[in-house]
Image (spheres, rainbow, N blue to C red):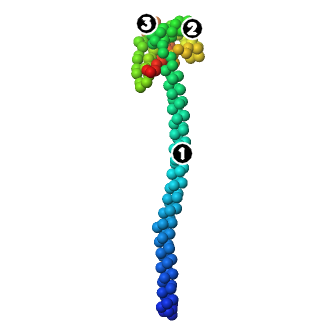
Amino acid sequence: MFEKLSNKKKFIYSLVLFLLIFIGIIYKKNILRISEVKEKITLSKEAYKDSHQIGMEINTLNRELNYLNSKIGEININPESVQREIIGYISENGKNIELNNVDKIHYASIQDYDIYTNSLILSGSYKDLITFLYKLEREFSLSKLINVNFYKKKNYTSRSTTLYMKLIFQNYESKE
């Protein structure tokens, strides 16, 4: 087929083929890279918008955290007086409930807060303990009840079992 063509036509076809290959190479090297760069720019703009949104969310969360920190460490009361108030509440409202043990106040310090923990052991019937616990959770606001544990102990001399309820209260005091 190429044998019938003149040299001038062979040269023109070769030149056209060369131009097509050259245009393909230029397209691949430059235009595809430009489209990739444009795509990266749009992704960067979206990421910038998202980062701006995240910055606003961080500010909101910091405000909420500061508010909660002010609420947690709001009460600045002597730990011994809190323990006396708990015992007083039990003696006033704990019908048919016996106070068996009062542990020493446990102190701990974490970052911006001093934490003190009161632990008490009460005994009585299940109904009396549950009724008292419900009332305590609803009405007593001086300290936060964080743990309740029920357990039984058998007294082998009197051949009876006693139901105990261990209460743990915590207070947070801001160091500031």
**Residue type marked 1:** Asp
The kind of secondary structure element at disc 2 is helix
Q: Position of residue 114 (x, y in %)?
A: 43, 20
Evaluate if marks 3 and 1 touch, with contact meaning CB atoms under 8 Å apart.
Answer: no
Mark 2–mark 3 Cα distance, whole angstroms, equals 31 Å
Residue appearing at x 45%, y 10% in the figure = 80
- List x then y, in percent, for residue 85: 51, 9
Name the residue nearer the viewer: 154 or 75: 75
The numbered mark at residue 30 is none
Q: Earlier in the sequence, mark 2 or mark 3?
A: 2
* Label 1 neighbour load within 10 Å: few <14, some 14-19, many 20+: few
- Pointer 2 or 1: first along the chain: 1
The residue located at (43%, 24%) in the rendering is 112
Question: Marks 3 and 1, how far apart in space?
Answer: 71 Å
Specify the amino acid type for callout 2. Answer: Asn
Q: How many marks?
A: 3
Residue identifier under label 2: 93
Tag 3, which secondary structure?
loop
* Identity of the residue drawn at 50% across and 72% down: 24
SS assignment at label 1: helix
Q: Which one is closest to the eye, mark 3 or mark 1?
A: 1
Local packing at callout 3 (Cα closer than 10 Å; few below 14, some 14-19, many 20+) is: few
**Residue 157, numbered label:** 3
Give the numbered dot on residue 50: 1
